[in-house]
Amino acid sequence: SFNFLQYASSGLSAQALGQSVSHADSAENTTTKQSSLIASPLLSILQRALLLAFIIGALLLLAKPWLIDFGLRALSANPNSGLAAKTYLDVRFWGVIAELMNFAFIGWFAGQGKTRYMLYQQGFIALLNIILTLFFVYGLHMGLVGVALGTTIAFWSGVLLALWLSRQHLQISWTALFTADPKHFAKEKMLRLFSLNKDIFIRTLILTLSFAWITRLSAQSGDVILAANAILLQVLSISAFALDGVAVSAETLSGQAAGRRDWPRFRIIVKRTGVVSYGLAIMLSALWWLAMPTYLQLMTNIEPVFALAYDYHLYAVLLPLVGVGAYWLDGIFFGLTAGNVIRNAALILAVVFFPLSWLLYQQWDMTGIWLSVWCLLLLRLIILGGFLYHAYRTGSYEKLQPNV
């Protein structure tokens, strides 16, 4: 729910990089001058994001006993599994600040196109997590506590690595990395950051509730339909890993163009990333069409579930093609840091989607559920596309991109 820390950091850092490079080009042509022009705004964006992550994480940590007890009651956990979950979460929660900071670092690196640093950071966390967890569980026989402790230490270690990578990237000292410029923490700057994060949080919450609603409709139709849909919807989750790669590129490039106010370049980026996105989606749908029988056999050996999933597999096969537009335009608007548009688009989506999906479900049951999934993805494309087309026709891109 707090991944807005990633998306906000990505858009803001992309724009700051675009602005800084533009200013550096017009400034005195010295390495020192250019480095200082570029490092200052980028560093302040990272510092603000990390401060916000720390505040949210600290509040969650303070509320840990209440959150765990409430969550276990809400999930109706039985005594044995509830005790096991509490044992795990009591330790894992000590890493919540580091996990939220990790979101901020990922977005900050992505916005500048430093995907290599993202790979270093995420790969290091994953590898250390595996090693520590195996050591604590099998070496020290710590059980669930060892699992949670391995993950917690890995995330905090990832923060240390990300700080070192950030210092190397900006070519500044450790002292400078932790020295804040008061002008970048002025009231208006912080309020804008909170506003942008709030807007993205509302958008993420609505999308989460939308997919939860689809799951609820499946559950109402019985266990077989619920299981079959859960397997088929994994096609969207798996495809998203590939499609998100292009979306991150769209976010980075559009944000940098917007930071320079280079709107002709921005329009070229929109077109080219759109072509690449849909080209990749066609390839993914073709691959799923070929692989679907094998995929279903790997996912279940329950004959009724397999048969039902196969009957509806074409709906899943087309998911990459149906959903790619939503991912692509999400990246464009995150790059613009157009928080108002992102929020308003999500609110319009909620008003249209929930009653429409209920009508489709009442009319066609299982087919209605899949038409609802398609509608969720296509409505996001249509609504965001409408905002972008209006800005294109009126030449009012600046209105989409509040001054940060």
Image: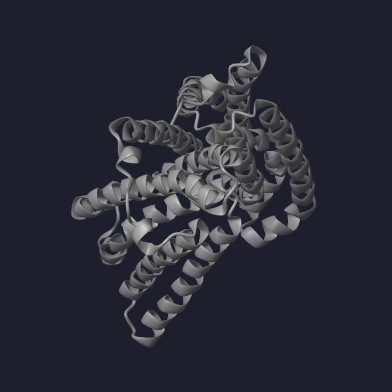
Q: Is residue 322 above or below residue 109?
A: above
Q: How many marks?
A: 0
Give the side of residue 98 with respect to residue 300, left or right.
Answer: left
Residue at point 60%, 45% (across, down):
248
Residue 16: x and y in percent read 51, 40
Q: Is residue 103 above or below residue 173?
A: above
Confirm whether residue 92 shows in the render: yes
Q: Is residue 237 above or below residue 262?
A: below
| In the image, farthest residue toward the top | 394
Residue at point 45%, 37% (across, down):
204
Residue at point 41%, 33% (across, down):
196
Q: Determine the image quadrant of residue 27.
A: top right
- Foreground residue, 374 or 273? 273
Residue 263: x and y in percent read 65, 26
Q: Determine the image quadrant of residue 82.
A: bottom left
Q: How is the image coloured?
A: one colour
Confirm whether residue 67 shows in the render: no
Residue 165: x and y in percent read 49, 63
Residue 152: x and y in percent read 35, 67
Q: Determine the image quadrant of residue 133.
A: bottom left
Give the side of residue 79 with respect to residue 255, left or right.
Answer: left
Q: Is residue 248 above or below residue 178?
A: above
From the image, which quarter does the N terminus lie in? top left
From the image, which quarter does the C terminus lie in? top left
- Foreground residue, 86 or 270? 270
- Foreground residue, 39 or 57? 39
